[in-house]
């Protein structure tokens, strides 16, 4: 068995430079796809940050001031829906509890993916795998 090879019980085969078996990707993260897994994490973090930003742009923190309801004669040059009072009303975060719950969940997920991305950045710099990091004292070629 070559150095840095480990048998994966989920894949039922020996994998060179085995990092870990990832249930989200459905295969082992190893020699051939570690860079792809790293970029997968980077883009997941970016996607979560974009969705978190977009979700925060929807509601305002404070209630919007009521807009005056103009007469029908002052609509020249504007859309016929631009003065509708329901279309100008902005929701506060307190009025959108589902959105608030989603933003909290996305915040936690972004934090955890950022931690995982940071850990795999450290592993890439150290030229180590997750398995080697966890089993450092038990691996003979690392002594």
Image (cartoon, grey):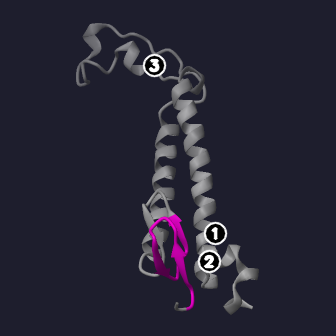
- Point out residue 125 in the picture as x, y percentages from the top left corner: 61, 82
Instruction: Give the residue pinned by disc 3.
Output: 89
Kindly report the distance in space between the C-alpha atoms of the residues bearing marks 3 and 2: 49 Å
For the record, the magenta segment spans 3-21
Q: 71 left or right of 50?
A: left
Q: 25 left or right of 122?
A: left
Instruction: Give the residue pinned by disc 1.
Output: 119
Q: The C terminus is located in which quarter? A: bottom right
Kindly report the distance in space between the C-alpha atoms of the residues bearing marks 1 and 2: 6 Å
Tag 2 secondary structure = helix
- Point out residue 33 in the picture as x, y percentages from the top left corner: 42, 75
Q: Are marks 1 and 2 in contact (CB under 8 Å)?
A: yes
For mark 3, does the 10 Å Cα neighbourhood hold few (<14), some (14 to 19), or many (20 or more) residues? few
Q: 77 left or right of 50?
A: left
Tag 3 secondary structure = loop
Tag 1 secondary structure = helix
Residue 123 marker: 2
């Amino acid at each position: 068995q070559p150095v840095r090879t480990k048998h994966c019980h989920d894949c039922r085969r020996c994998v060179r430079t085995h990092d870990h078996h990832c249930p989200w990707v459905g295969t082992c993260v190893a020699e051939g796809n570690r860079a792809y897994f790293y970029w997968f994490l980077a883009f997941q973090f970016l996607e979560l940050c974009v969705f978190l930003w977009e979700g925060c742009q929807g509601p305002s923190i404070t209630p919007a001031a009521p807009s005056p309801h103009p007469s029908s004669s002052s609509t020249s040059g504007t859309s016929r829906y631009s003065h509708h009072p329901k279309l100008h009303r902005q929701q506060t975060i307190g009025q959108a509890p589902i959105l608030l719950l989603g933003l909290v969940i996305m915040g936690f997920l972004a934090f955890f993916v950022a931690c995982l991305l940071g850990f795999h950045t450290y592993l890439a710099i150290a030229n180590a795998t997750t398995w080697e990091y966890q089993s450092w004292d038990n691996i003979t070629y690392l002594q």
